[in-house]
Image (cartoon, helix red, strand yellow):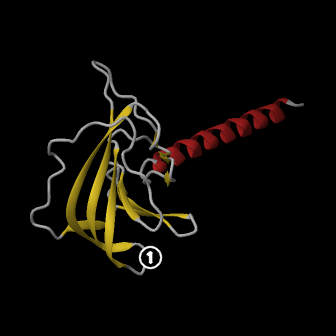
Amino acid sequence: MTKTAKIILISFTTLIVIIGCGAYGLYYFFNAFAPPKVKINKEYISTNRDFINGITIEKIEVDSIGIENYPTKYTVIYRASCHIQHPENKPPNPPDKIFFGKKGKYSWTEEFVETEFVHRGLSRYTTDSTYNSPWRPLSESHEVCPLEFQSEQWYFITIGHPSVTGVFFYIDKSGKEHQYFLPSGVSPI
């Protein structure tokens, strides 16, 4: 191999490495702007990020379904919230998967509520002027989720991420699970 051929080969290899690293960096840069991927089933909820802010599962009574096949007007009748444990003097190690029927580095609280909501566009709004603030005293703590998913029942799950309004979850008569992801339109960065 001639000296010129070696220089061309080294230059070409260097160029390929630079392009590859740049593409890799751009992929992760732009991926940071995308909402997290969320998967829900009867046993757990998982994400490609983490649940540093915990999750809230709302059991809802549906008044109307929109053209997207998920509720647009409903009443929240029950709420179970998962709180990530924060070790003393250490930053939390948030999970990327929360199991409903198993203990983890989180605890659960529950409350019975009655608050109406309407979905418009990417957001949801309460129609109840006496809506209870989420910053109220919590109920007794549970090691596992006190809620069990039921067939033919709608749930709305919030994951505490700014780019996600929430996820509607429904199990039909045959046991098939359906989820409808609602982005908020807000950039997470």
Q: Residue at x 81, y 34 (%)?
A: 4
Q: Position of residue 94 (x, y in %)?
A: 40, 34
Quarter of the image for residue 34 reads bottom left
**Nearer-the-camera pick, 49 or 8:** 49
Q: Residue at x 87, y 31 (%)?
A: 2
**Residue at the extreme right of the image, as rendered:** 1
**Nearer-the-camera pick, 75 or 38:** 75
Q: Is residue 73 above or below residue 82?
A: below
Quadrant showing the N terminus: top right
The residue under label 1 is 69
Residue 130 relative to residue 20: left or right: left
**Nearer-the-camera pick, 36 or 116:** 116
Q: Position of residue 67 (x, y in %)?
A: 42, 81
**Residue at the extreme top of the image, as rendered:** 89
Q: Position of residue 62 (x, y in %)?
A: 33, 73
Q: Residue at x 28, y 66 (%)?
A: 123
Q: Is residue 168 above or below residue 16?
A: below
Residue type at mark 1 is: Asn
Q: Is residue 86 above or below residue 45?
A: above
Q: Is residue 171 above or below residue 11?
A: below
**Nearer-the-camera pick, 68 or 83:** 83
Q: Secondary structure at mark 1?
A: loop
Q: Position of residue 98 (x, y in %)?
A: 45, 41
Within-10-Å neighbours for mark 1: few <14, some 14–19, many 20+: few
Res. 121 in view: no
